[in-house]
Image (spheres, rainbow, N blue to C red):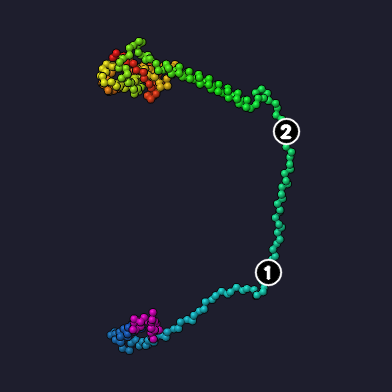
Amino acid sequence: MFTWICPQCGREVPPSYTECPDCTAKGKASASPVAESAQPPANIPPGTEAPPQPPYVPQAPQAAPPYAQPQYAAYPQYPPQGQYPQYPPPQYQPPPPQFQAAPPPQYQAPPAYVPPPARKGLQALPTWLLTAVFTVAFVGVVGGVYTLVGHGGSASASPAATVENPAAKAGAKTSPVQKYVEVSGVRFTEDKKHAIQVKFTVTNHSDADLSGLAGNVTIWARTQKSEEDAVGTFAFKADVPPQNSVEVTAPLVTKLKIYELPDWQNVTTDVQITSPQ
């Protein structure tokens, strides 16, 4: 940015000013007291006026101080060429100890062979003969067990298919509607007097109206055996429309407690219709 220097005060003035602002302000300040002092006050007697002010003389501009050279640190002093610093000689260190190989293993003679003692009894027989003897014995034992189990199972299964209802009367005639009646959904409960009740569903699969239907039912566990007793028996009476079913509740005659009875999914029934005949 260009400036001009005032010839009176030596100040740098921006080019936007035609006159130095400092000199102009000083001129106005000096002119106003002089004008006021030109008029003597009325109360001052003559001969006591103040002496005139000396004229303003502008000060010459002062030159800038000389540029001071920066001080730099001195460079390090190196030894003259061909001269090097003296270092102590390296100290000798002894070499590490060398690895000592282990002595080779010494050969040892194997122990003398001692023949095994002579075998007696079955041990004297050869291996193949012992294998054949034990195989025949094992087959015979398995065959005998299978035969006994097979006969026992057939003997226990055959009476289960022909079990008669204990509640039915001996020599009773089979009802013609026996094959159309189904008893299912057996569930065990207790009444307020802790008597065991059985709830079940009687289904009529025929087209006839079975009014006054009566029968005796024996309950067996699904895992029944020929020597086991029945879970219990009960008798029922109901009127069942054709192709329909009814819910019936009856007291259960049993020697078991409620917690000893089998679950509903492990129960089978043996039904004998007593009415109609």
Q: Residue at x 65, y 26 (%)?
A: 126
Percent from the top left, x then y, of residue 23?
36, 83
Q: Secondary structure at mark 1?
A: loop
Residue 2 rendering spot, x and y as whole percentages? 38, 81
Question: Which residue is labeled 1 in the image?
Answer: 86
Q: Please name the residue shown 62% across and 74% down the image.
A: 77
Residue 37 appears in the picture as rendered: no
From the top left corner, tell me how far across and down residue 60 is, in percent: 42, 86
Mark 2 and mark 1 lie on one chain; the one further toward the N terminus is: 1
Eye-nearest disc, 2 or 1: 2
* Residue drawn where x is 50% and y is 79% of the image: 68
**Pick the front one: 14 or 204:** 204
The magenta region covers: 1-21
Say what amino acid the circle numbered 2 marks. Tyr
Q: Quadrant of the N terminus?
A: bottom left
* Element class at badge 2: loop
Give the residue number, with chain letter if any, for mark 2.
Answer: 113
**Looking at the image, residue 166 lies above or below residue 77:** above
Q: Is residue 8 magenta?
A: yes
